[in-house]
Amino acid sequence: MVYNAAYSFKISHKILSKLVTIGKFDGTNYALACATVGGKVFIHIPGGFKKAGADENYSSDPSAETNVLNVNQSIKCLAAGKFDQNSDRDFLFVGTQTHLQVYDVYNNADILFHQTSEGVDGCCVGRVGRYPDVLAIIGAQCTLLGLNKTDEEQFWTITGDSVTAMILCPVLQNGRNQLIVGSEDYDIRIFEDDEIVMEMKETAVVSCLTYISGSKFGYSLENGTVGVYEKNTRLWRIKSKNMALSLVAFDVNGDGQLELVAGWSSGKMDVRDSQSGEVVFKDTLPAACAGLVVGDYTGSGRQELVCCTIEGDVRGFVSSELGERVLLTGGSGGQEQVRSLTQKKQNMEMEMKNVEMSRQTAAKIKAGEYVASEIGAIPTDTEVKVEMVPRMSDHPEVPSCVQLIVRTSNETVIKAVVVFAEGIFPGESHVAHPGNSGSSDDDVVVPLRPLTNSLLDLHMKIFVGHKTSNYLHVFELSKQLPKFSMFLRHEKSLPADNLPSCYVSFVINERINRIFMWLNMVFLLEEKPPEDSAEMNVSFTYLRTGEHLSIACMPQRMAASNLQQSQKPVDSTNFSSANNRGKFIRQGSDNSSCAIWKVTFRTDDIELAGDLVQSLFEFISVSGDIQCEAHFPHVLYNLKHLVQQVDDLYEARSRLSAEVADNSTLIRSMVVKAEDARLLGDWKGMRNTYSQLYTTNQGLINSYNIRCQNQSDLMAALKLVNQIIQRTANLRVGTEKSKVIDCGRLAIKESKITVFEQYLVAK
């Protein structure tokens, strides 16, 4: 039986990738809005669609209306939604490099025109958090801006890098919408109001986000990864050599549960179960997918999955018919269950056969008929030991790393180790072999160099056998690489002269053992803290940069005089550790019952300090506000310099704009003058005028190039300013964090950096 889509037609416009949306622009019927070449947006209204029979299939009609909106700028994002609470119509939101335009398609009128120097990289519409108005949320260079219909700024916060994807959805299931933002720093952040409540680190730039249901949302990365999170827990992920250009949630098989639909750069469209990632349905489009949207596009009374390609092809599917195709192809029906059960049966039979062979072989070895090493059998007590050790490189050309050391517990040898890890190896896998000697005491060492400070899962397959055996046994192990694994523990605490001058300090009410537990979890430290520990001082070297990190924890009554000056160097306690890791300093035990501690992180890297603060507060589940004292004067100096640079660039841009306007007026007058000279036969005057026109036009082109460079420098400076504000905010939690962001916004708008000094320089 041949199956066709519910409808399929071709629009006479190219469609730009990821710039497709759908909305009820007249308040009743859905229309498709797509960006096309030349800075234009076309709105396709399926008014010419007619029912083709009882099966409710539709065919295209050349008379279907297509309206074109000329934006005359490169379009960066496209969205549709209700912006006026008193209207049932959806408005069209168009983001460019210079402004956000809100367009009323029905009345052919602009509702809002907001200019922004940072451009509009992403846009979504709806209510967010505690804000009562419907807001247009703009994502730009590290900033998120919320505007109401009167162009009033009601929401502003910052994120880690340039925004690449954003959605509004009730992912926390608390009756309010949260803002989920993906950015170029590989992070997915969930905002409750203007505060980050959850943050997930990925391995590539986030390209798409879509809400599914409940607490689940789908995401895709530029490296071809597609997956689903439930809040901050990843349920599954898959990776392809192609890139997913669009994601949407749609009930494909009519079971009442939304599946994740992905459109790929290869033209493939696949549908996966949102809980398990199992493929439910596949289809192939004529060209690369430009966008996927869901709505009653043809007025059939049912939700439809509308697939658009970059060549203008449009295909539509409805839930029930997709379900029919799934059953026909065995996607989720009885045939699929039979296939799955058959596969399980074969696997169990193979396993039983191997167990029986192993039993017979063991009996023959015991009887002396076989030699274990000759037939590949290994001792039953064979264990594979895995250890991770940070190592400082002895050669400047070779970067430092964390060594993954794999060895066996007896005379067997390791023939190969396959390590699977995201964010460490190209292609996310690495194969390592032992030396050519092949002796039993050879260890397999795999260098690990994670690019960022994030928790990573390592999955290993270790091939073990005898030296002369051709049969190998495979051990499968998993291990986690701690978040701050690229830090090498010092045997002794650093002298005061070598300690970093910058720090962040705060007081917490927590047992010291909990802080030790956090250290062991996020650093490569394995020793348990002594029961009578009353004070802690530990130092590290950051293997990526060679900078020092000092972590001190003292009872509050002992810490008042030690904030600016660190403790004197003391030899570490006598813990037994082959790798000299995890040796903590003890100075007395009379304060072991103290539950109020002053914790100080000393480092010149404000981003690292913020990561440490957020990691510790997340581990001990701090509720409420914590007063933090930070001292990073060099960051304040850089901020002042950047703000001055931004002001200079704004002034230069205004001056350049005035010059361009003057030259444009002059060029128009020269064109008229040259034409008058031609009509009068004044050929010499015409040649002189055209020569002047050429020179002026060249100057105009040069001014344009300077303006482009000015805009690029301005974007880079604003991005650095916003990153400094965010890293300063990460030194706090709760409302204190929000205060830092609000103060930073005020300081930048009014160029009064002095109000921000209190957060970066200790008094």
Image (cartoon, rainbow, N blue to C red):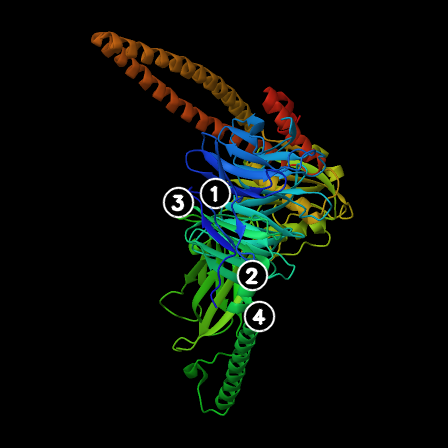
Q: Which mark is residue 321?
A: 2
Counting from the top left corner in percent of width and height, residue 755 is at: 65, 22
Query: Looking at the picture, how far across and down is residue 513, in whole percent?
Result: 71, 51
Look at the numbered discs 1 and 4 and tell me whether their residues touch, using CB distance below 8 Å. Answer: no
- Quadrant in the picture for residue 147: top right
> Label 1: which residue?
63
Residue at disc 4, secondary structure: loop
Of label 4 and label 3, which has the lower sequence position?
4
Kind of residue sitting beneath label 2: Glu
The answer to which of 160 and 100 lies nearer the viewer is: 100
Q: How many numbered markers are drawn?
A: 4
> At label 4, which amino acid type do we have?
Gly
CB atoms of marks 4 and 2 within 8 Å: no
| Image: 669 above or below 29 | above
Q: Is residue 140 visible?
A: no
As rendered, which of 121 and 614 lies closer to the eye?
Answer: 121
Residue 658 sits above or below residue 54 on the image: above
Give the mark toward the camera: 1 or 3: 1
Q: Residue 24 — which label?
A: none
Between disc 3 and disc 2, the foreground one is 2
Q: CA distance from mark 1 to mark 4?
A: 41 Å
